Amino acid sequence: MIIITRPDISDAELDHIRERVESAGLHTHLSRGEQRTIIGCIGDEERLAEVPLRSLPGVESVMPVLKPYKRASREFSVDRTVVRIGDHATIGGQAITVIAGPCSVEGRDMLHETAAAVRDAGATVLRGGAFKPRSSPYSFQGLGRAALEMLTEVRAAEGLPVVTEVLDTRDVDLVAAHADMLQVGARNMQNFALLAELGRVQRPVLLKRGLSATITELLMAAEYIMAHGNTSVVLCERGIRTFERATRNTLDVSAIPVLKRETHLPVIVDPSHAGGDAELVAPLAFAGIAAGADGLIIEVHPSPECALSDGDQSLAPPAFASLMGRLGAFAEAAGRSMSTPVAARRVGALTGTAA
Ligand code: PEP
Ligand code: MN
């Protein structure tokens, strides 16, 4: 922590600031310039968290030296974190992981059909909302527990681990019993009770950036989960709210390299919710990979025009397969590869030729 003093600070005020810092257990170091004196505070900065330094007479400004997030910070871990989802999928290694599936689980058949289609196209994780955080209370809210059961059934039948959103602290154990990864939606990114609860479960968490959250706020939300004991967190840039109305949100491409610089946690991109338009999914997915994302989460529906939520931005299976076919070149240009499809891994495991 560095304290910059006012030019007219008195000796008594300077002594008082030093006393407050030192009584919190830190040492001080004075650097006297022509105009002002700077007080360097040496020691555990966290001990100053409750000291209202800015309000002390003679203080002009206070600059923290350390980041507010620790466990999530790049410095905390020598290696980048690789998050495991179920038995076969990972996010954060050299390969790009694609999560795909419907916005909402609408029924058993559509879930089987979508899971098989996305798996055959190369996705390694299935998504599907059971509890939906809709902006309107009159919109489809998801099938809830019944959808969770369908996800469990389809996961076993189609061989894909599943991710689904949890909205409420009371549902954390229920959702964790059915899903391989728990999603925190944009609207809940700062639901600190939910984040703390997710720190206690043995399931990876997909944490989506809030609609108006800064990068630091996203990292602090991850820090909450990690500080409560769960270090398997994947961050998701899903577009933020700006003045622009031509797209549902604005994909903050810059957030991807900034996050990769700031944290060891994997970062994925949601081009579906960012653009809000099926036509924009491919270009935004390519941009995400080019910017260094570790994966994508994409909405796919067997018949987007009949979807009960987010049909406009959902890809039909052929469009998704075509996108997957074109992603490889972008992954290669970014020095990455595409994650091996589950089916190929299974064959590899049987013949002993692949990991
Ligand atoms: C979703 O993934 O379906 C969803 C609701 O996303 P977000 O929380 O990013 O709006
Ligand atoms: Mn959606």
Image (tube, rainbow, N blue to C red):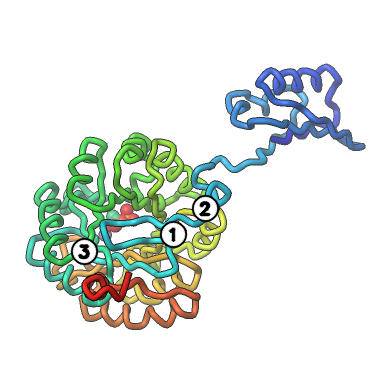
Q: Which residue is mark 3?
A: 160
Query: Residue 101 lies in what quarter of the image?
Result: bottom left
The residue at label 1 has a CB less than 8 Å from ligand 1: no
Q: Is residue 98 above or below residue 236?
A: below
Tell me where residue 316 appears, x and y as whole percent: 21, 75
Numbered circle sitting on residue 263: 2
Numbered circle sitting on residue 267: 1
The residue at label 3 has a CB less than 8 Å from ligand 1: no
Sequence-wise, the earlier of marks 1 and 3 is 3
Distance of label 2 from label 1 (alpha carbons): 9 Å
Q: Which residue is at 69% across, 17% downward?
A: 23
Look at the numbered disc 3 and give the secondary structure of its residue: loop
**211 or 127, which is in the foreground?**
127
Mark 3 surroundings: few (<14), some (14-19) or many (≥20) residues within 10 A: many
Q: Is residue 331 left or right of residue 168?
A: right
**49 or 152, which is in the foreground?**
152
Tell me where residue 333 appears, x and y as whole percent: 49, 80
Q: Is residue 332 above or below residue 255?
A: below
